[in-house]
């Protein structure tokens, strides 16, 4: 006997098949979004760090602290940035106000989302800790051509006089 109620569970069965596929697609889109957000913040911090280095006579802790404050826009969740047991931000500064070119390199680790971590490990995309390494490097000229060719040299004190 076929009646109007025999297809009652069809939508439930379809949802049972469709939901895992939709969740997997969501995970596949979420991980690149997280890494993209990290890279955008890191690029901004590296660019500001380069601008800071062009006016700094001897880069040190102040410049490092400045960039770490900029990097604090990244949440301290392992999916965005590994923060425990120790912070994984590695900041390398290159150059100062007397250099022709300055550079900043920022590296961190990100824990992959569940299910993706296994496939990324099999593809060799993770490090020995099972995390993804995200790295950004920004280089820029410290002085414009007119300053580099100046008869006063590349010393800012000579330009003032």
Image (cartoon, rainbow, N blue to C red):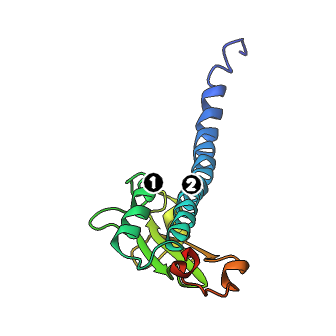
The image quadrant of residue 129 is bottom left
Q: Nearer the viewer, residue 54 or 111?
A: 54
Disc count in the image?
Answer: 2
Q: Measured from the top left, where is residue 93 in percent x and y?
A: 47, 78
Label 1 Cα neighbours within 10 Å, binned few <14 / some 14-19 / many ≥20? some
Q: Image check: 124 left or right of 128?
A: right
- Regarding residue 70, the answer to whether it shows in the image is yes
Residue ID at (49%, 65%): 117
Q: Secondary structure at mark 2?
A: helix
- Residue 63: mark in rendering: none
- Regarding residue 124, the answer to whether it shows in the image is no
Could you give the CA–CA distance between mark 2 and mark 1, rounded to whole angstroms?
8 Å
133 over 155 or under it: above or below: above
> Outermost residue toward the left?
85
- Callout 2 touching callout 1 (CB < 8 Å): yes
Residue ID at (64%, 77%): 143
Q: Image check: 108 left or right of 30?
A: left
Q: Measured from the top left, where is residue 21 in percent x and y?
A: 63, 46
Q: Which residue is mark 2?
A: 37
139 over 72 or under it: above or below: below
Q: Nearer the viewer, residue 120 or 21?
A: 120
Task: Tell which circle, 2 or 1, labels the residue nearer the N-terminal end.
Answer: 2
Q: Which residue is mark 1?
A: 74
Label 2 Cα neighbours within 10 Å, binned few <14 / some 14-19 / many ≥20? some
Q: Nearer the viewer, residue 151 or 71?
A: 151
């Amino acid at each position: 006997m076929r009646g109007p109620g025999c297809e009652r569970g069809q939508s439930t069965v379809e949802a049972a098949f469709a939901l895992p596929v939709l969740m997997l697609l969501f995970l596949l889109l979420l991980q690149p979004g997280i890494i993209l957000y990290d890279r955008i913040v890191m690029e901004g911090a590296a660019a500001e760090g380069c601008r800071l280095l062009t006016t700094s006579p001897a880069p040190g802790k102040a410049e490092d602290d400045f960039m770490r404050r900029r990097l604090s826009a990244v949440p301290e969740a392992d999916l965005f940035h590994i923060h425990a047991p120790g912070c994984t931000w590695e900041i390398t500064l290159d150059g100062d106000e007397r250099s022709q070119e300055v550079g900043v390199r920022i590296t961190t680790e990100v824990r992959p989302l569940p299910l993706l971590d296994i496939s990324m490990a099999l593809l060799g995309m993770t490090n020995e800790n099972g995390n993804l390494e995200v790295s950004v490097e920004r280089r820029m000229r410290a002085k414009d051509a007119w300053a580099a060719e100046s008869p006063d040299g590349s010393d800012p004190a000579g330009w003032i006089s």
